Every structure is written in C-alpha cells, then in structure tokens.
Amino acid sequence: MEKKALGYYGEQAALAYVRHEKGYHVRCCNYRNRLGEIDLIAEDGHTLVFIEVKTRTTAAYGLPCEAVERNKRRKITRVASAYLAQFDLWERPCRFDVIEVWPDDQGEPVIRHLVHAFQAERR
C-alpha cells in the first residue's frame, strides 16, 4: 500500500472508531491552517480532543506513536491553539490523543488508542 493510501486508510479507520466505538462527536477531519494540520478534532463529552493518527504496516521501525516526537507535538500544539482561538474555545478542557492503526492479515484495521498521549508542548 502506498504511503498516501495507507494514511487515508488509517484516518478512515480512526474516524469510524471514534464515532462508532467511542461515541465521540467529530468536529473536523484534517483541520489545516498556516501552521500545520490535525488529523481529527472531536468532542468526548465536553472535552475537545485533538487526535493524531499514525498508520503503519509493520513495527520494524518502531511503534506508530513513536513517530509523534517533540517537534510534531509542538506543531500539533500550535495548530490546536490556533483552532481554539479561531472558534473562541479557550474555556473548553482539551487533550491530545494518538490513534495507532495497523492492517491485520485480512486488511482489517487493528487500533490502539492512546488517550492523553502527550501534553501541550511549548518551545
């Protein structure tokens, strides 16, 4: 599976998971601004959840969540801050999750959801 198709596969699997398994209300998919992108923005009750989706076909290069390193966390934090400012949502509780996705032998998604995967990163 090519990289772009694999990413789309993972994002669609994560979207279905948060909607149907977790019961979250999805506010936005692939939110973009001049600072970057957040894969999914959802509401878990009153809490805004900024979700980074990482998809891999193998663990040969480590777990998918390990790709969400410090620079990526800082970028996600900046994009999330801009989102909060744009929609005047500063009073809402927020968290950052990572959803890992792997296709199994039949091509079905295997999902691992890391709730509170990281805290907002500054500098």
Image (cartoon, rainbow, N blue to C red):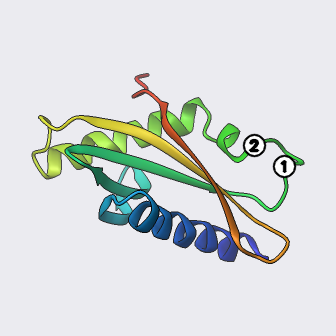
- Corner quadrant of residue 55: bottom right
Hey, which residue is sitting farthest right in the picture? 60
Camera-nearest residue between 23 and 51 = 23
Report the residue marked by disc 1: 59
In the image, is residue 80 above or below residue 36?
above
User: Residue visible at 31% across and 64% down?
Assistant: 28
Camera-nearest residue between 24 and 65 = 24
User: Residue visible at 43% across and 42% down?
Assistant: 76
Hey, which residue is sitting farthest top in the picture? 123
Q: Residues within 10 Å of mark 1 (few under 14, many from 20)?
A: few
Q: Is residue 122 left or right of residue 12?
A: left
Q: Residues within 10 Å of mark 2 (few under 14, many from 20)?
A: some
User: Residue visible at 56% across and 69% down?
Assistant: 13
Name the element at disc 1. loop
Could you say where residue 3 lies in the image, as x and y percent from the top left? 72, 69
Could you say where residue 48 lies in the image, as x and y percent from the top left? 27, 45
Does the CB distance between marks 2 and 1 fall below 8 Å?
A: yes
- The type of residue carrying mark 1 is Ala
- The type of residue carrying mark 2 is Leu
Report the residue marked by disc 2: 63
Q: Is residue 94 left or right of residue 112?
A: left
Q: Is residue 56 left or right of residue 45?
A: right
Could you say where residue 26 lies in the image, as x and y percent from the top left? 31, 63
Count of number-bearing discs: 2
Name the element at disc 2. loop
> Which quarter of the image is occupied by the N terminus?
bottom right
